[in-house]
Amino acid sequence: MYAQMVKSEAADDSPEAISFQARIDAGEKIEPKDWMPAGYRKTLIRQIGQHAHSEIVGQLPEGNWITRAPTLERKAILLAKVQDEAGHGLYLYCAAETLGVSRDDLTEMLLDGRMKYSSIFNYPTLTWADMGAVGWLVDGAAIMNQVPLQRTSYGPYSRAMIRVCKEESFHQRKGFDIMRKMSNGTPAQKRMAQDALNRFWEPSLMMFGPSDKDSVHSAQSMAWKIKMNTNDELRQKFVDQTVPQADYLGLTVPDETLKWNDEKGGYDFAEPDWAEFYEVLKGNGPCNRERLAARNKAWDDGAWVRDGLSAYGQKRAARKVAAQ
Amino acid sequence: MAHDPDLFEFLCRMGDNTLVLGHRVSEWCGFAPVLEEDIALANIALDLIGQTRMWLGLADEVEGAGRSADDLAMLRDVWDFRNVLLVEQPNGDFGQTMMRQFLFDAWHLRMLEALTTSTNTRIAEIAAKAVKEVSYHVERSSGTVIGLGDGTVESHSRMQAALDLLWPYVGELFSTDKVDVAMTQAGIAPDPASLRAGFDAYVGGVLAEAMLTIPDGDFAHKGGKTGFRHSEHLGHMLTQMQWLQRAYPGSSW
């Protein structure tokens, strides 16, 4: 899940708001020119913006291995994946722009820390197996959230999610493929694979956010169909899907309490360390500083390029007018 | 295919150019000035890596020593690389990267166009595929060089500095040695020198539109394509690129 702890605005009880809710309940899509409550718009901007930022910052931990990929094919696959993420960021910024906020405004809010991105991207990628674990676990967790969001009430967001999901499931398969290769490889490769699972397991569970079953904000987002499931539902589904995959790989999920529960038809598992999660959100994750510094540096170093190209665009337009 | 050392050498030159430049361009991933540029640079790097797999794959077949494209990329040392010095130069700022790309693309397109009529059908097939990709590369890098050259005072001066820095690496693209002579005689590849006039006309036109001045003098660094003397930069690049294969030899990835 690339959007965490998005604070929802309250609904109002105006006649417009009531008929708006009726449209959502009837499964209609809301389009940019339709009337919408201010709270709906604001909440969506927060959520789509955070999602877009996650795609952009999410390029960094995987980009970290592009220049060290072990074969030409792996390098091409990884590069294509990171490029897809930039593309997802682009669709999502475009979806957010339909709500009346510019990409530059959103970018500034990311760069000065007013807007967040998913906690997961504040963890380091230390071995090649991490490229497998990120695809398998992180994209796997993202898909859990994004598949239902294809049915979200806001048309542009829903359409962006449909495109994103197609690519994400490809990414997850590629990630799993790396894990399979590593788990069946040399003792050093197996060790890398287990180590990657050990480090990414809890941060992946945190991606869904803390339990929100009693949250008023979540209830409003769910009524608006901006959020489709509770965090706990998605986390359970993720664990139930992932544990058999880890077994298939011959890897051990780092949770001694993990146990199949016949009654609920799912696994019982330990909660991740939520104190660590809140520290990461506050900026104290292992890589928060590096990630934001890298984005800020790219933006600042690129200022002359953006200025140059826009100055040229203006000159060209002026020359065209003069020639006419 | 009987082992032909000149043909092997020629294929390594083609493949190492795209390998090294593709790697350099991939270093930008996640750090470009705008999102659209990030996506475009990744596209170019992907094309170049794809071309590398074809050139070095054919080099493996020609050599017949069981060195796969990956082995050639990941297990040779600096002295066995045959790329021109231009492509191993560091990225510098975005302008320097785009100027390097533009100068290479303008040569690359002409080279590939000529190779589409190679007497070696395998080479002609690879060139036919690559030429489509590279036509787009040259269009894009030309447009960016013009936009930044004729943009603001700062972008203009950065682009001029990039041109001044990189121009001395252009001459090597057109230098001819015994490998080129053998390729030309067999009708496999053009004489590099024969591509110069077309290159100069095209590049001269773009740079004029970009308000940039080609530096005086025809001094040209050399030593990359023969492997005699690479720059210090290549070794550091290989240290990173080859690290996993070197640190964990014999593993399958």
Image (cartoon, coloured by chain):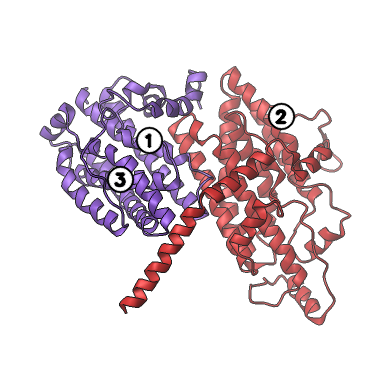
Chain colours: A red, B purple
Assign a secondary structure to mark 2.
Answer: helix
* Residue B218 screen position, x and y as percent: 20, 39
Q: Secondary structure at mark 3?
A: helix
Viewer-side label of 3, 2 = 3
Residue at mark 1 to residue at mark 3: CA–CA distance: 13 Å
Q: Quadrant of residue A258?
A: top right
The chain ID associated with circle 2 is A
CB atoms of marks 1 and 3 within 8 Å: no
Q: Give the residue at x 76% y 45%.
A: A281
- In the picture, the disc for residue B89 is 1
Determine crowd level at label 2: few under 14, some 14-19, many 20+ residues with C-alpha closer than 10 A. some
Q: Are marks 2 and 1 on the same chain?
A: no
**Quick check: B60 above or below A73?**
above
Alpha carbon separation for disc pair 2 and 1: 39 Å
Q: Residue A150 location, x and y as percent?
A: 65, 59
- How many residues crowd around disc 3 within 10 Å: few (fewer than 14), some, or many (20 or more)? many
Q: Split into 4 quadrants, where in the image is the C terminus of chain A?
A: bottom left
Instruction: Name the element at disc 1.
Output: loop
Viewer-proximal residue among B42 and B68: B42
**Does any portion of residue B4 appear in the rendered image?**
no
What residue does disc 2 label?
A: A198
